[in-house]
Amino acid sequence: MRTLQARQQTVGRYQGGSSRVEDALSWFSRTQKCVTLSTTEAEYVALGDEVKEILLLRQIWRFMLPQVDMPCIPVFEDNQGAIQLAQNPISKSISKHIDERHHFLRELVERKEISVIHVPSPY
């Protein structure tokens, strides 16, 4: 029987202005705090973690530059299923087992605070 830790996904994320390591704003690699049932769900949970950090950076930006308008933030994701979960709140049968706290992404997409954009992956 596998332990809880063995069933948790390891995720890594990079946030920056380009694909160059020198332009990184932040990055992380860690084990997810919850057990997920699929790659799509693991990517969706990781996307939520990434967006939380982006929102923190946005709050700092608003504090430093209150007069500047805040654009919709593009968030890049390579998993089509995770993108569909974030953009389509009607997929209840597929996502009913996912904890409600992860679905804040849908609200952010709906309010046009973020847009989730597909980027092809070689994997």
Image (tube, rainbow, N blue to C red):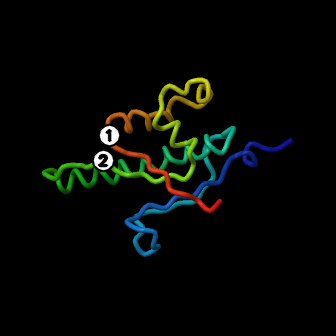
Picture residue at 76% right of the left edge, 49% below the top: 6
Tell me where residue 9 appears, x and y as whole percent. Answer: 67, 49
Tell me where residue 43 appears, x and y as whole percent. Answer: 58, 47
Judge left or right: residue 68 versus residue 34.
left
Q: Earlier in the sequence, mark 1 or mark 2?
A: 2
In this rendering, the answer to whether 22 lies above or below 31 is below
Picture residue at 13% right of the left edge, 51% below the top: 67
Tell me where residue 109 appears, x and y as whole percent. Answer: 38, 38
Picture residue at 69% right of the left edge, 38% below the top: 37
Farthest residue to the left: give it.
67
Give the residue at mark 1. 112
Farthest residue to the right: give it.
1
Q: CA distance from mark 1 to mark 2?
A: 6 Å
Judge left or right: residue 65 versus residue 109.
left
Tell me where residue 96 appears, x and y as whole percent. Answer: 59, 25
Q: Nearer the viewer, residue 99 or 83?
A: 83
Q: Amino acid at mark 2?
A: Cys
Asked whether the residues under the numbered discs 1 and 2 touch, taking CB atoms below 8 Å apart as contact, a structural biologist would say: yes
Farthest residue to the bottom: give it.
22
* Residue count near mark 2 (Cα–Cα under 10 Å), binned few <14, some 14–19, many ≥20: few
Q: Quadrant of residue 123?
A: bottom right
Label 2: which secondary element: loop
Judge left or right: residue 113 versus residue 87.
left
Give the residue at mark 2. 72
Q: How many marks?
A: 2
Quadrant location of the N terminus? top right
Judge left or right: residue 123 versus residue 54.
right
Q: Amino acid at mark 1?
A: Lys
Label 1: which secondary element: loop
* Residue count near mark 1 (Cα–Cα under 10 Å), binned few <14, some 14–19, many ≥20: few
In this rendering, the answer to whether 101 lies above or below 48 is above
